[in-house]
Image (cartoon, rainbow, N blue to C red):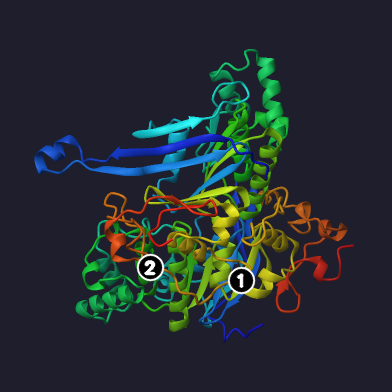
Amino acid sequence: MTANQTAALEVSRLDRVFDVSPPFLNRLLYGQKRKSLHAVNDVSFSVPMGGCLSLVGESGCGKSTVARLVTGIYPPSSGQIRFAPGKSGQPLSAQMIFQDPYASLNPRWRVKNIIAEPLRELKLIDNDAGIQARVAELLGIVGLAASDGEKFPHEFSGGQRQRISIARALASEPEFLVCDEPTSALDVSVQAQILNLMRKLQDELGLTYLFISHDLSVVRHMSDRIAVMYLGRVVEEADTETLFADPKHPYTRLLLQTIPNVNAPQRNREIAAGEVPSPLAPPPGCTFHTRCPLAQPRCKSDRPELLPKADGARVACHLA
Amino acid sequence: MLDATDACLEVRNLVVEFPNRHGTVTALNDVSLQIRPGEILGVVGESGAGKSMTGLAIQGLLERPGHIASGEVWLSGRRIDKLTDRQMEQIRGREIGAIFQDPLTSLNPLFTVGAQLVETIRQHIPQMGKQAARDRAIGLLQEVGIPGATERVDHYPHQFSGGMRQRVVIALALAANPKLIIADEPTTALDVSIQAQITGLLRRLCKEHGTAVMLVTHDMGVIAETADRIAVMYAGRLIEIGPVETVLKSPAHPYTKGLMASIPALGARVAHLHQIDGAMPRLNAIPPGCAFNPRCTMSGPRCRRDRPDLAPTGTGLAACWLHDGGVA
């Protein structure tokens, strides 16, 4: 990976609160209180230009919310998202690849129209012949035939559909791609095809990725830097090799421990107990203290800050 | 191979067909396997390979017009594939327990988990009284590791988290002490840290009760951690079966080899993952000869002509001409 030091995307102190209160009448008649869900809490990270940063965590940790904030689908409650200037001098343009290629493609549209939609909507090419040529080129880039444009999404397998989503995302020539679990709906042999394609596109088109996944082996293959999230906060951020060689936060260690290793199955290991607490009522202090094997009295009251370490990692733990 | 008498489940040459307007689709073709008591057989394959179909056919749950066209299913020495729906109802739950992918849809949201457990227990063990059944329900919840089982027994499914719900589903599957449990993607809907808890639980319970388990999943990691033997399926056929170490470390079939190589390793990082080009053929367009031959890098003329059967490879069986007289 050749990632130079300038940041393509800088996110600082990002917060997003969702109002999940019961309806007005329920509050009025039954005296129910307003409730809010702090989905993303004080998250800061930066993605190096031409590199790949991965957000990892279990469901409900806020990783998909961060993706949606970065692409502007949700406005942030507070905090800043800054894209570096791209080739044109304007901020980098971002596009998104979604998890489920069965739900993210309109079943009633032909593939050529699905891919042409951003070209037409954003008025990037104004003649039909130009659009057709660009669609054929995009299909070629993702390894499909130009004639596939005439077909409907149901005629394709899961992996091919994900190729179509990638072609659509590339249509507007973005320099930044947000990939929200792009392979978790796919079979392993197809997952490898898509991951290889994404790496190839990164090298050829100079793309920068924000990659979101719960699968650490996929993340390790794709990313230069990894941020581990737990209950809306980043608990550890480090270069991929550092994180795998020397995980510092107990939650990162738990995650690494639980990955089933095909080559060395650990049959009779001790499994860390407990589950993720509800994000509606996060524990006080360090949010991980309820499951942490090393928790001290201090962890229950003081929230640890995300502090830099000597090897470039940032860790939010009193004991690290 | 074992005698029919040792095996808890024995499937012989099972063929499942779905007739439709355009002809007949063969969803399962000549599948044979056995599971011993206390053994976990992992069944892996891509979506559409027929792994869930095998589980459904054994339980007599094939959706019409699908049916078993030929072959036999034996459960502890009794043939069960020709039984009536009525007779199969006696077997499902009592002798074959089932665990499905989504723990929320496999529990009734309107009843407490205790009521659902008591109903299942009394349905299959009618001589048990209400109080005894409730005690057994609490015992089962404790056994699957639900803290505070005496209170939790009166809670509704929505009051449990995903991992806890899957534990309740496992308790339900165990309620009547079945001989065989068919677990179809039991961990797919769960988070990684919970996944390991559930596979560990499944493995412990199966060894303690001597229950045979057929674990259907697409996740090689889960299989590696849980199963004793692995069966690999491709396009409706069983293409390799053998002990877990052999199939994972030195797979014999080129498809299994490709599958293993395409998993991103946790050790060294590589620039390019091994990939198997193309996709599994649709069941109505399976090529002649070996179904894998268009994607196989080692195929020869014989692979396009004749279909290989399972043949011994040393410790396991594989359906590939490379192990059965050459591809020429």
Where is residue B297, by image quadrant?
Answer: bottom right
User: Among all residues in the image, which is located at the extreme top?
Assistant: A127
Q: Quadrant of the C terminus of chain A?
A: bottom left
Q: Which residue is mark 1?
A: A264
Describe the element under mark 2 as helix, strand or loop. loop
Of the residues shown, which amino acid type is indicated by label 1?
Answer: Ala
Residue A239: image location, x then y, percent: 57, 51
In this view, the residue in front, A210 or B309, is A210
Of the residues shown, which amino acid type is indicated by label 2?
Answer: Leu
Q: Which chain does tag 2 point to?
A: A
Where is residue B244, by image quadrant?
Answer: bottom right
Does the image show residue B61? no
Q: Which mark is residue A294?
A: 2
In this view, the residue in front, B285 or A314, is A314
Q: Which chain does tag 1 point to?
A: A
Residue B249 vs B5, above or below: the answer is above
Residue A188: image location, x then y, percent: 62, 55
Residue A165 vs A85, above or below: the answer is below
Instruction: Tell which circle, 1 or 2, labels the residue nearer the N-terminal end.
Output: 1
